Amino acid sequence: MDIVISGLLLGGSYALIAMGLNLQYGVARIMNLANGELLAIGALAGFWGFTTAGLSPLWTLLAVAPVAFIGSWLIYRVFLLALVRRARSQGELEVNSILATFGMSFFAIGVMVSIHSEYFAYSFLARPFEILGTTVALNRLVAFCFAVVIGLGLYLWLNHTRAGMAVRAVSVSTEAAGLVGINVERVSALAFAIGGMITGMAGVLVSTFITLDASVGVIFTMKALIIVIMGGVGDIRGAVIAAVILGLVETAVASLIDPGLTLVAAYLIFLLILLFRPQGLFGRGAA
């Protein structure tokens, strides 16, 4: 039971991290390798707010959301839209976006290292809380609850608003969406910005219970990518289930075998998915 509850709490945080990349890749068709660096920036904001101003990370969460949204929107419009317009195929766009965002990730890491080169962590709600006989840290439970609220809000927005349905239409087919009058570039920019906003908020939540540094973003980018591929590109439901699976597997490996093997377990799952079901658990194969 300890492994299940701890795995679910970890999976909830992973789901929030992956949702941002899923929107950016599944809708805007941008494989954003700087996704983890935005998470690290959000985490650093939570750390600074708490240690310098005594600001609760839950308030920092509200401040980070619009800043991450606007920043991500500007990155798409200024740096990435030209790649989208120039690409002659989806494959070319993916290669170009990987190279561009890879460079952005190094730029972001350099800036963060120059500002704060040490590990950062702080004590927020770091006290035990019992669930079904299992003791967990209260900060992990609070982060999980906020992740559920944010994820549920995104799901409702995607399925019960006109803008959300436009985003879903673009994720299915940019050509068909354009034919029915949807402004694909505007919707893609919106999806990329919302994805960045969710990632930044996830960074604040993760900072409440994990010790981080400026270069940790690459690990979270890889885990988000594993979840997106495992669940199916563009499928929010699949991302949530894949995140829970990854959280349970990592928790089980850390508890029963060796904490140092959690990344190995994650990459093994990734390899198996690529070999036997490359479209993901809930993705559809090529027609």
Image: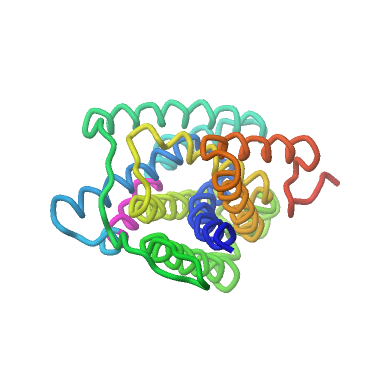
State whether residue 159 appears in this view: yes
Q: In which quarter of the image is residue 61?
A: bottom left
User: Can residue 186 be found in the magenta stretch?
Assistant: no
Specify whether residue 66 is painted magenta.
Answer: yes
Give the percent coordinates (x, y) of residue 143. Answer: 41, 61
Residue 54 in the figure: left or right of residue 75: left
The vertical placement of 243 against 263, above or below, is below
- What's the residue at 78%, 51% (across, down)? 284
Horizontal and vertical percent position of residue 280: 73, 47
Task: Give the total of numbered labels.
Answer: 0
What are the residue bounds of the magenta stretch? Answer: 61-73
Task: State the residue in front, 151 or 8.
Answer: 8
* Screen quadrant of the N terminus: bottom right
User: Magenta: predominant secondary structure element?
Assistant: helix
- At a point 82% along the width and 44% down the height, the residue shown is 286
Front residue of 211/252: it is: 252
